[in-house]
Image: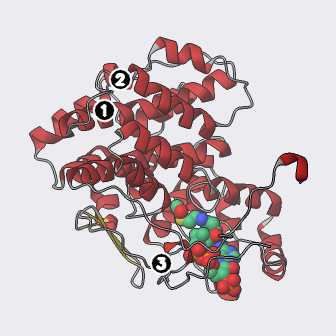
Amino acid sequence: MADTAANSQVNLIKAGLEDAVVSTSEICFIDGQKGRLLYRGFDVDDLAAQSTFEETVYLLWYGHLPTRKELEAHTKALSATANRKLPPKLIAMLRLFPKKTTPMEILRTGVSALSAFDPDADDNSREATLRKSIRLTAQMPTLVAAWERIRRGKPLMTPNPKLNLAGNFLYMMSGKPPTPLAAKTFDVALILHADHEFNASTFAARVTAATLSDVHSGVVSGIGALKGPLHGGANEQVMLMVDKIKDPAKAGAFIKKAIADKARLMGFGHRVYRVEDPRAKHLRRLATELGQQIHDMHYVEILNTVAAAVTAEKHIYPNVDLYSGAAYAAMGISTDQFTPIFAMSRVAGWAAHVLEQHGNNRLIRPRSDYIGATEARYVSLADR
Ligand code: ACO
C-alpha cells in the first residue's frame, strides 16, 4: 500500500462550498434569515407584483429599470420573430432525436447547437454577448415548445411577435392563446426564477465564463447543473411525489413514512434560506388561483398538506420548486417540461452573470486537498 499524502495543513472550506464567498457581485442579494431576495436592489416581491419578465431581464443585464423607450426597444428585440425563430437545420436536427429524449436533454443540446448558427458566435465583447443573450432568451421558449410538439407529432407553431415571452410560449406549446390568468401567472413565475445569486447553475455558468468562454457555453453549463434533482430538477420530482400521494388525506402519513425512511423531500430545504423561500408564497398563491379557475384544487391541497407536515416534523421550509409545478400543471404543461421552463427564465440570470464575470475576470481555479496515494509504483500489466 502506497503512502498517502499527509498534507492536510490546508484550511478546507466546508463541504459543498457552504458559506464560502467567492466573489463580489452587484446582481442579486439573498437574506437567508429574513427570507428576502433582491435583484439589483429591488425586492422580488415588488417585481412579482409590478414588473414584467421583459423588464426584469433588462434590470438584471443593465443594472437599472428601463425608461419607457429602453423597455420598448428591449421588448421588441425579445419578441422579434427573427430572434425567436429556430434555424430550420436545428429543427431538422430535433426531428432526429428519439421521441423519449427528455426536454432537458433537448434543451442542453439545442442551446449548444444554437451557438453554431449565431452570427456573433466568435465575438465575446459585451455588445455581442448582449445580442447573443437576447437571441438565446428569445429562442429557448421556441426550442422547448418545438420539442413538445415534435415528440407529440404535432405541427410547429410560428412565434407570435404580438405576445410577450410568457404568452407566446404558452401559445407555442398548446397552439391556442393562453387565458389572461395563465399568461400573467407564467410571466410572474418567470420573474421569480430569473436569478438567485451564486446557486449551483449560475456558479457553473460563471466558472465557464471565467475561462473567457462564450455565453452559449455558460448557459449550457448552467442547464447541465440545473437539471439535477437537488437543484432545478426538484420541481419535476415534487410532482412525481404528489402523483404518488394521490389523495390529500394520505399526505400526512406519506410524509411521516418518508421522514422515518430518511428520504429527501423534494421542494423543501435550501442552502441559504433558513425560513420559507420568498418565491414559494407567490407560487403557492398563483397555483391556488389557477386551480380555482380550472376547478381542480387537487395538487394544491396535497402540497399544502405536505408543506404543513414537513414544516411541523422536520423544520425545513418550502423552496421555489414546491408549488411551481402545480401552477404549470394547471396550464396543461407536462411534468418533464418544468425544469426547461425554469431554464427559460434563469437564462436571464446566467447571462447577467456571464456579463459581470467578463467585465472583471479572473480564471476560477480552486485547489483540492489531496488525500490520495503519493508513492504509487507502476507495475507492468503482465505483473499485475
Ligand atoms: N429533505 C430531507 N432532509 C433534508 C432536506 C430535504 N429536502 N433538506 C435538508 N435536509 C436535511 C439533511 O438530511 C441534513 O440532515 P442531517 O444533518 O441530519 O444529515 C440537513 O438537512 C442538511 O442537509 P444538506 O443536504 O447538507 O443541506 P444542503 O444545504 O446541502 O441542501 C438542498 C440544500 C440540496 C436544497 C436540500 O435542502 C435538498 O436536497 N432539498 C431537496 C431538493 C430540492 O428541493 N432542491 C431545490 C432547491 S431550490 C433550487 O435549487 C432551485
The reply to whether dot 3 and dot 1 touch (C-beta < 8 Å) is: no
**What amino acid type should be assigned to the residue bearing mark 1?**
Lys
Whether residue 109 is visible to the viewer of this picture, yes or no, is: yes
Q: Which residue is drawn at the image coordinates 68% and 76% (left, top)?
A: 4
The reply to whether dot 2 and dot 1 touch (C-beta < 8 Å) is: yes
Q: Which residue is drawn at the image coordinates 23% and 32% (left, top)?
A: 128
Image quarter of residue 243: bottom right
Ligand 1 location (quadrant): bottom right
Left or right of 43? Residue 192 is right
Q: Which of marks 2 and 1 is nearer the N terminus?
A: 2
Neighbour tally class for label 2: few under 14, some 14-19, many 20 plus, Cα within 10 Å: some
> Residue 142, percent across and down?
47, 28
Left or right of 181? Residue 242 is right
Q: Which of marks 3 and 2 is nearer the N terminus?
A: 2
Q: Distance between the residues labelled 3 and 2?
A: 38 Å
Q: How far apart are marks 2 and 1 (CA)?
A: 7 Å
Observer-nearest residue: 183 or 293? 183
Q: In this view, does 43 lie above or below 311?
A: above
Tell me the quarter of the image containing the N terminus: bottom right
* Numbered badge on residue 118: 2
* Local secondary structure at mark 2: loop
* Numbered badge on residue 273: 3
